[in-house]
Amino acid sequence: MPPSSQQVALLDDRPFFEKALVYGVRNGIVTQQKLADILNDAPKGMVQIAEFFGTQYLRPNIEEARARIVNLVSLFLEEGSGGDLARAARSLRDQSFLSHSRGGSEMLKRLWAMPEDGSYGVLARPSQKEFLDDWSLRTLSEYRQALAQRQSHQLTIAAGLWFAENLGMAAAEVSTVAVESVIRTAMLVYLSATTPAAVPNAAGLIAIFDTIRKKGVPAKGRKRLQEIFKVVPEPYRAVARRELKRVEAEDLPKVLDASQPMNQLIRDLEPLYFLRDFGPEDASLFDAAVSEDWQRITGGKTDDNTLLTIFLCLAADIAPKPALSRATARALVRKLRADGFRKQPVLAFIRASAPYEMQDDLAVLWREFAAEAEAVLLDAADTNCRDALDFLRDNCNVV
């Protein structure tokens, strides 16, 4: 009687080790003596695995160890044989069962040692034991997917370090960075024809943006890029072209758009690039560019009453002003009561436009004020807005 489709599915669900072993025995590849050796070695390996992950004296640990050792052997066999049962059976014949288990374990240890993402110099990762605890029960398809991803990350890191050195920065000087930002920076530097070609600091990045905005991408920049791609090691070229495409498709249109303020451009693009010597001077330079809106709106004033007046206007979704007339203040209160008290846009404005060193204190100032202001200004019992106006006079600028 032919097997049912359900029976076939069950057969297909067997571990690859079991499939290879059965095939080997049936086809005379694995002898009875070799089968006895496997049956003798398997308990030893199970005890070692159980002891590594817990204890050999608890039955659940032994049962789990059995699943782990079968899976490790299956990983090693199927990956090494390419899924060919005859080849896998010959491997079982020629090598010990425990060597297959160690082979699967070594596969996972090599996977663990490879980078999880495109970050360089970031040491945080699960311990090898934690990794093996998880991955010794994973499937071959999961292993292959993770291997492809990690190989891609490894290639990207190697390419990033090559470009860093090409721009005069030794690999030892690159730490805790997404290497895509290094390659992206290199593409921008080559395109801008900056001389000498080097990793820019804050001032250099702003100068590159400003030059491209005024004069466009120079022809000699395109020529330099062509020359670079001739000497880039072939494995790195696809990675470099990917970052070049991002620069051309995502960054250059923003740089060339004169309607976009430079402070906004810096906020959008600076996090995507790798800079050298980012010290206090660079932070101040960025603050100066980013704070143009802040200076324009506040008029350079930093007293609490002025800032709270501006914040309250933003919360009411009206044009921010450093001072309100009595009539405007009354209209603001009515708008808040009709449309609601919008706290989040104020915090967004602080994070986007306020000088960095002031942001945390301003956020606290706003939150403390907003908690009281919302209760007073939205009080429906205050029908003539008298209490609301008194509150605004005490805390804001009402003239």
Image (spheres, grey):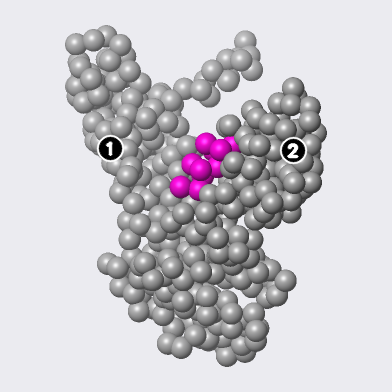
Q: Is residue 234 above or below residue 321?
A: below
The foreground one among 67 and 76 is 67
Residue in the image at 66% along x and 37% along y: 390
Does residue 366 belong to the magenta stretch?
yes
Count residues near mark 2 (Cα–Cα under 10 Å), then give few for <14, some for 14-19, many for 20+.
many
Q: Earlier in the sequence, mark 1 or mark 2?
A: 1
Q: Main secondary structure of the magenta part?
A: helix
> How far is the residue under mark 1 from the one under mark 2?
57 Å
| Left or right of residue 38, residue 306 in this image | right
| Residue type indicated by callout 2 | Val
Q: Provide the residue designation for mark 2.
A: 333
Q: Is residue 226 visible?
A: no
Q: Nearer the viewer, residue 252 or 291?
A: 291
Location of residue 397 in the rendering, given as x and y in whole percent from the top left corner: 63, 50
Query: Could you tell whether 355 is left or right of 324 in the image?
Result: left
Q: Which residue is mark 1?
A: 127
Q: Is residue 303 above or below residue 299?
A: above
Q: Secondary structure at mark 2?
A: helix
Q: Is residue 255 visible?
A: yes
Q: Quadrant of residue 387?
A: top right
Residue range of the region highlighted in magenta in the rendering: 361-370
Residue in the foreground of this view, choosing between 220 and 59: 220
Q: Position of residue 49 (x, y in %)?
A: 24, 25
The N terminus lies in which quarter of the figure? top right
Q: Residue at x 60, y 60 (%)?
A: 298
**Residue 139 versus residue 322: which sits nearer the camera?**
322
Helix or strand or loop: what does disc 1 sit on?
Answer: loop
